[in-house]
Amino acid sequence: MIIGSHVGFGKDQLLGSVKEAISYNANTFMFYTGAPQNTLRKSIDSSLTNEAKKLMKENNILIDKVICHAPYIINLANNLDESKWQFSINFLTEELKRCDELGISYMVLHPGSAVSIPRDVAIKNIIDALNIILAKSSKCQILLETMAGKGTELGINLDELKAIVDNTHYPIGVCLDTCHLNDSGVDLNNFDEYLNLFDQMIGLDKIHCIHINDSKNAIGTHKDRHENIGYGTIGFETLLKIIYHDKLKDVPKILETPYVGKDILDKERIYPPYKFEIEMILNQQFDEKLIEKINEYYK
């Protein structure tokens, strides 16, 4: 089982990310190289990176299973404003360079939103942008994330993902997100059916990451609101079957579930659930007292 969660990337950079992952008893993790909502970035500190790699080795964390996530502000789909489209291309290019410096193999990317242009045109823009970016060469491979269909998001079905994968001239892959799949209309109770279709259209060898999230919403609502494992509409048993699926056993599973606490409006009392959700998953048993345990542990 290769399982972890989203972690921070602060003043200690990758070293801090590794330490946080270890505190959750995880053997992988996902991070942003800076705030996902802005362009502020500190130079990569090679000494911190080297310390992080040493610590990873000591704790059996394989760096080629660690995932980076691209910033939210990148939108390759809409080029009505040429300068904004070029900004997204340039920023993603720089993020890939940072991953190369860190030795990270995969970066998850939201394909983008069409906004006010036709979806087929937006998909072509994504393809064109990726071909420009990847022509500059990077060891880090982009993974298109399956999206919920909120607003004018692209990548909400296999046809759209296939179009991008097939027409990008360089290797790219896919990151499945269980909440997004549910919210886009995929019945995860019939996950084998979806996986077989994915294999026929795109190929299972393209799946290099799975975001494991329950959903606050009913199937097909296109809302994209994550819920803690077993507390949402997908359910613990269904998620467990996906996590332990034999065809996906070597794929890293990453939790992006909400922080929890006694009062979600009071940030001082919201805590990461990952240590306990990972424990539930490894024990393969749902814990109805998850929230209470988290509050007790962090108080």
Image (cartoon, helix red, strand yellow):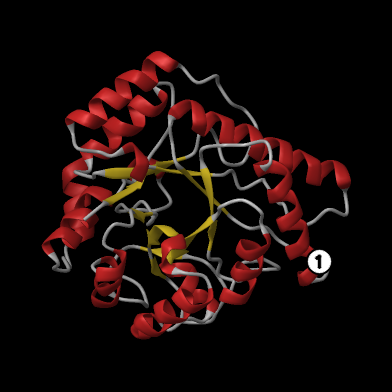
What residue is rendered at 29% in x and 53% in y? Answer: 262
Where in the figure is residue 275, as x and y percent of width and height?
Answer: 22, 48
Residue at figure coordinates x 56%, y 44% from the top left: 70
Q: Position of residue 37 (x, y in %)?
A: 61, 41
Q: Position of residue 272 (x, y in %)?
A: 31, 47
Q: Residue furthest top?
A: 47
Say above or below: 146 vs 17: below
- The answer to which quarter of the image holds residue 17 is top left
Q: Is residue 8 above or below residue 144?
A: above
Q: Which residue is mark 1?
A: 121
Nearer to the camera, 257 or 88: 88
In the image: residue 139, left or right of residue 131: left
Q: Which amino acid type is marked by label 1?
A: Val
Q: Nearer the viewer, residue 188 or 103?
A: 103
Q: Provide the secondary structure element on which disc 1 rests.
A: helix
Q: Residues within 10 Å of mark 1 (few under 14, many from 20)?
A: some
Residue at coordinates 23% horizontally, 76% vertically from top-left? 237
